Image (tube, rainbow, N blue to C red):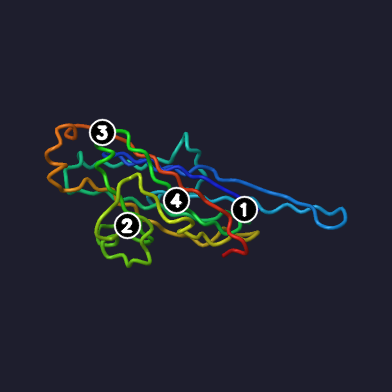
């Protein structure tokens, strides 16, 4: 039986908010005789924008990453790092990015990309090899409603005394420089938020 976990990511066009919810699941069974075993809790935590501490954040209280840049113009992007790891004694976790439902025209216009990268800059995303791309492509983003392949981000298992190896991700959120965006009268001055979900599934035998 597999254990499921869910994490929320909330992003704004001007101020980016990222949250990761507590992801805990457990299951048990009986072996021969009267012995009972219970598998380790399945959980992963995040480090947002490189700021300590690591934490399990509920979806109703996400970790906040403030962006002080001015309102986005077409062709501009914002970047933020999110690093994930399995908690102590957790098995390996395969994470899937689930697409978000746009709230308005601005949300529909935004495009995003997620790559595996220890640095989170324009160069890191645009230069990412295909094998490191989680969502979208290095050259262009995809609508926020688009998700990743299932279990594409693998978090190595923790041990009884240590958390799993960290997996750094970089999110790029872009307002495209297109005629459609420039000429849409509903976009200037508007704001939106986008909430993604990261679904995690325990991986048998740590694979």
Q: Earlier in the sequence, mark 1 or mark 3?
A: 1
- Between the residue at mark 1 and the residue at mark 3, the CA separation in whole angstroms equals 39 Å
Q: Earlier in the sequence, mark 2 or mark 3?
A: 2
Q: Which residue is mark 3?
A: 191
Q: Which residue is mark 4?
A: 47
The image shows a total of numbered marks equal to: 4
- Between the residue at mark 2 and the residue at mark 3, the CA separation in whole angstroms equals 24 Å
Q: Quadrant of residue 186?
A: top left
Q: Earlier in the sequence, mark 4 or mark 2?
A: 4
- Between the residue at mark 1 and the residue at mark 2, the CA separation in whole angstroms equals 32 Å
Q: Is residue 37 left or right of residue 93?
A: right
Q: Which residue is mark 1?
A: 2
Dot in front, 1 or 4 = 1
- Between the residue at mark 3 and the residue at mark 4, the CA separation in whole angstroms equals 26 Å
Labels 1 and 3 touching (C-beta < 8 A): no
Residue 121 disc label: none
Q: Which residue is mark 2?
A: 120
Q: Residue at x 29, y 51 (%)?
A: 142
How would you rate the neighbour count of disc 1 (Cα within 10 Å): few for under 14, some for 14-19, many for 20 or more? few
The location of residue 204, given as percent across then percent down, is 61, 61
Q: Earlier in the sequence, mark 3 or mark 4?
A: 4
């Amino acid at each position: 039986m597999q254990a499921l976990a869910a994490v929320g990511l909330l992003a704004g066009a001007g101020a980016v908010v990222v949250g990761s919810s507590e992801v805990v699941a457990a299951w048990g069974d009986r072996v021969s005789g009267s012995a009972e075993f219970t598998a380790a809790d399945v959980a992963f935590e995040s480090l947002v924008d490189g700021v300590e501490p690591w934490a399990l954040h509920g979806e109703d209280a996400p970790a906040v990453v403030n962006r002080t840049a001015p309102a986005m113009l077409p062709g501009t992007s914002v970047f933020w790092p999110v690093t994930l790891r399995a908690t102590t004694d957790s098995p390996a976790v395969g994470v899937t990015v689930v697409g978000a439902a746009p709230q308005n025209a601005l949300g529909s216009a935004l495009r995003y990309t997620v790559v595996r990268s220890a640095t989170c800059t324009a160069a890191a995303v645009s230069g990412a090899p295909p094998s490191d791309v989680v969502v979208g492509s290095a050259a262009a983003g995809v609508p926020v409603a688009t998700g990743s392949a299932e279990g594409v981000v693998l978090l190595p298992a923790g041990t009884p005394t240590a958390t799993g190896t960290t997996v750094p991700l970089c999110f790029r959120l872009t307002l495209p420089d297109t005629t459609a965006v420039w000429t849409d009268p509903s976009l200037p001055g508007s704001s939106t938020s986008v909430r993604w979900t990261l679904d995690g599934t325990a991986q048998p035998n740590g694979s």
